[in-house]
Image (cartoon, rainbow, N blue to C red):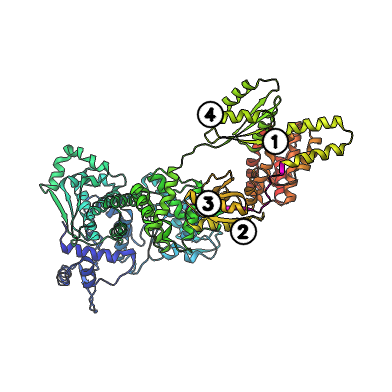
Amino acid sequence: MKTMKDIVFEFIQREMLSNGTSKEGVTTKEIAETLNLQRSNVSTLLNDLVKEEKLEKTATRPVLYKIRNNTTSDYGLSQMKFIGIDGSLSKAIQIAKAAILYPKHSLNVLVTAKAGCGTSFFCNFMYMFCKEAKIMQADAPFIKVNCRHYRNHMDELDNLLFGQEKGKLDNCYFSMAKGGMLFIDNAELLNAHQQSLIFDFLETGMIYSADRKEYMDCKDVYLVLSCNPSHVGQYNQRIPMIIELPQLKDRPLIERFDFVNYFFSIEANNAKRNIEISQEVMQALLLTEYSRNIKELEMEIKKACATACVRVMDVPNSPIIVDLHDFNSNIQKSLVKMRFRSQDILSLVGSQNCFIYDCNGTFQSNHHDELYNEMHTQYKELSNRGINAKAIQDVINNHVTNLFKQYNYNHGYDESYDTEQLSKIVDFRIIELVQKFSEMTKTELKIILKPSVFYGLCLHMNSLLSIKSSHSRVDNDQLNFIVQNYPKEYALSAQFALDFKDMFGIELPPEEIAIITMFLVKTKDEIDNGHPVLLYILHGSGIAEALKEVTISLTHCNNVYSYDLHLEKDNLKAMDEIRSLILKIDEGQGVIVIYDMGSIRTMLDTIAQENDVKIRYIHIPITLIGIDVARKCLQEEDIDYVYHTTLLEMKSLDDNKNYKREVVITLCQTGDGGAFQLKQYIDQYSKLGFKTIPLAISKRDELIKKVMEIKKIYTIHCFVGTYNPNLLGIPYISINKVFENRAEDIDRILMFEPLQSKCMGYSGIYSFLEEQFKFISVSKLKSILPSIVDQLDVVYSLNSEQKIGLFIHIACLLEKCKEGIHFALGKEERQLIDLYEDDYKTISKIIKPLEKSFKVIIDDSQIACIIRIVNKI
């Protein structure tokens, strides 16, 4: 174990290193308070270090102690007592020294290492060595850039790193690092353009703007890149000095032993309690292989200490006893290797059965650790609400597990959510937080948030920024139930609440965390029970089948079926066939039947009763109307009499129509804010004039009561929200349908229109084309061409004239292609395609389905015509 003198000296070193900033020195008081030591003892240790010429003190009041500047060729780096300096890192340190002390100008360096091998720590010491060797000034900047943080925003990295935007050159990281060190971590993630800018710098020492008109001399920037060993080839031809850091498995056992002691000492100091581990735990930690190297060892020890701390949280001053079961199964199983390494392990551990780490025996880690304070606060909060100790331990243990699994994430957000429309009313930081939370739920709980739940949670969290949360929405009994029955979900929600607090400074109480948990519980408990299906039953031969085919062709839905009831068929046989068909197609949510006449309703009633199938009926007596009109036409001579008497008879079909004002109800299970903001979105973009009523009710009986009250006054057009209440046959529109389409399409969504075809005046065009076309089926054209125009509209924002013109042009060129007429590509068209290369690729991709459907090839000359139309050339 280190002596107290070593600990004090290392503390001062770390203080001088902190963030690469210059510090005049450290006072006796600072050291005593931070390390929890007597000032008189600290003073004695400091004077001894001064005598040993390791420290020097100022003549100021108060006296400051700092690392002594050396002028020997050995400089300060060789005496920095970090683990492995005289062992596995000795070669790396020699290369670093040689690069830094290279005559006239230091050589730029590439550090290659696997994740978690201590790259950042090593680069910090290189920076300190540069200053001690007087290669850099005492106040030289140290700028670190982690490319992993920008992997989804590489354009932003261009501006931050190189100042690619006009006027940004003076404020980029290369500019900020002048006279100091620029450390680019995970450089393998840089794209080809960014790598070329790095290579320009390595060759010329210059940084250029995007248009190459501005430049900056950055020869005094010492560049250090780091990358994974598998990507060394990207840079080794340009950077001669390559430093390889060893993996933990390749470092000697004594160094691993030092790391274990070091990390436990830090945790003891952070927790303000002594920590005890058995020889068995020490052996297991020494024998385990860690895929993420030193970082993984550190995090496993931190997690185990936090888990063990939960057991003694309500016992003041009790030591934290870390057991082997506090570690993951890989560490526990590693003891089987003991028989192969017993001699090596025993030479280190000896006969010592217990290792004790004093809470006052070492310094704190670089980052202030709030973990134990958070655990204590959470324990106290839940305990005060009467939740039993076992449930609390489950919650906090899950919280700790989730917290420490995060360091292994690359935050690869689920990109299936369309957030473009959502970002208009929700803070983008909220969206990013919920995306991160969604990734955690998928990894930790195997719960994939459906788009409706994702959007609903975004709206709910956004409402907390402006609406004061009400604790009455979840009473203490509900809170107790959630914590005890869903500890993992609650713990993950608690971590999410901490992230929310870190970003917005708003602390969420346990009641609010329980509401977040309810989003997960709802998703977890939801089972896809299928959907209703449509069945046409009509008299005649092929009529129902034809309607089915047309419906499928226009909607692209595969939930439509048909049964042709031949006039000569026996009713009992027909009923048996209909029964078999319904039982085959029913997904568990019932069948909607559109029928024309006769005893079909009676058959369906019998099938529903005998087979416990939900069947709903839509009676459209088209056949009866036809029969009636045909008979009247034979009996009467006055066409107007036939026409008007038929209309009067049909009027009875509309007798039950309700003319009360229509409303849209926005739904969110928890939180008024989400439903209200969805209402605001609809009110802002819809032109239908519907009244919008927001409801945030999670209990079904309360929701039914409220909906019935609204129904007395209004006609409920539909529900829009995060869940389908399945009430009174009222249609439901999922929130993801709203936010995955353009704001301009909101009325079409509310009117249940298929978005494949725009509401344009195509009927006259279709009539014209049917008269003119000989080779193209207009009915087939109706099913596919409007969606092609829609896609082009999304890309090029076409006006109505362009859309009509484009529609007619494409329809006619299809007719010509089908007829076998082809057009040669002229010089003008070829130049146009070369000039609009991106448009050519986009349009070719969009019209590809037309070529497949009609089995034609659309010439480049015709694509050039489309380019002219969309670009108004």
Q: Which mark, by number, is residue 705?
A: 3
Mark 4–mark 2 Cα distance, whole angstroms, equals: 47 Å
The first of marks 1 and 4 along the sequence is: 4
Mark 3–mark 1 Cα distance, whole angstroms, equals: 33 Å
Q: Secondary structure at mark 4?
A: helix
Q: Which residue is mark 2?
A: 684
Q: Residue 404: x and y, percent?
A: 32, 51
Q: Quadrant of residue 629?
A: top right
| Range of magenta residues | 653-669
Q: Secondary structure at mark 3?
A: helix
Q: Which residue is mark 4?
A: 611
The first of marks 2 and 3 along the sequence is: 2
Label 4 is placed on what type of residue? Asn
Residue ID at (22%, 78%): 59
Q: Which residue is mark 1?
A: 620
The first of marks 4 and 2 along the sequence is: 4
Mark 2–mark 3 Cα distance, whole angstroms, equals: 28 Å
The first of marks 3 and 1 along the sequence is: 1
